[in-house]
Amino acid sequence: MITKFWLPISVILIIILIWELSATFFAIPDWILPAPTVIFAEAVSSWPNYQHHIFATIHLTIYGFVLGLMIGLIIAITLHLIPRLREALYPLLIMSQNIPIIVLAPLLVIWFGFGITPKLLIIILVCFFPIAVATIDGLKQTNPELIHYMKMAGATKKQIFIKLELPHALPSIFSGLKISATYSVMGAVISEWLGANQGIGVYMTLASSSFRTDRVFVAILFIMILCLLFFGIIIGLEKMLIKWRKDGNE
């Protein structure tokens, strides 16, 4: 496991080293580009001041991601089971992603106010699409010969879906979940720019307006950490379920 990640870790360390040496050698002001050591020192010393922002973003991200997951799966399963509906609505599903979230966000505030509803809607909008598309594709790729065999054995449409199509689509579903897991953090930060009173997005806005570039980088650092954390959780769940599925087939 360690040997698998040594190369990207080495590249990251080299970039940090070059960054540190360049900031020191060229005497770049901290308000333009702080050195990694300055950012790390600020992250440690100011932890009591921004920890509640991080926890607020985590809670918002989890709620939005779960709702986006549920909506994405419901849409995908519905469109898969009703082909006519899929033909009618799938193009609209694609078109929904052509609207920039940053443009749609002010409209959500106008319609739903400054509460949690528009923030959750933004996260749902960025999360449900990868899940829905990946699930639809996974369900469609089920081996038709296996479907024909189950029909000959007298299996109902429900049994075919639960015992064959859905397990077969798990790898595709988890591919969509990985994308949505990282998008959910981004969506949460964007939603916090709308007028929230806490969250990493709020912390980043306050730091930027006061020219505390080191704090902006601290916010970026924790956004990256949260994305990797959620991505890792999805990978762990995938290994557990796919392993269970393989063991069950043996």
Image (cartoon, helix red, strand yellow):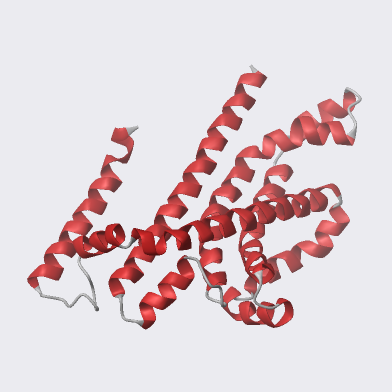
Residue under the image location 85 percent in, 31 percent down: 159
* Vertical side of 38 occupied by 98: above or below: below
Horizontal side of 26 relative to 130 (left or right) equals left
Rendered-image quadrant of the N terminus: top left
* Vertical side of 120 occupied by 172: above or below: above
* Vertical side of 210 occupied by 89: above or below: above
Rendered-image quadrant of the C terminus: top right
Tell me if I can see residue 196 in this picture: yes
Tag count: 0
Q: Which of the pair 156/143 is nearer the observer?
A: 156
Residue 51 in the image: state x and y as whole percent: 42, 59
Residue 190 in the image: state x and y as whole percent: 53, 71
Residue under the image location 88 percent in, 22 percent down: 153
Residue under the image location 61 percent in, 63 percent down: 123
Residue 54 in the image: state x and y as whole percent: 46, 59
Q: Which of the pair 179/197 is nearer the observer?
A: 197
Residue under the image location 60 percent in, 39 percent down: 171
Q: Which of the pair 95/63 is nearer the observer?
A: 63
Tell me if I can see residue 145 in this picture: no
Tell which residue pokes out farthest to the front in this image.
48
Horizontal side of 11 relative to 116 (left or right) equals left
Horizontal side of 82 relative to 176 (left or right) equals right
Residue 125 in the image: state x and y as whole percent: 65, 65
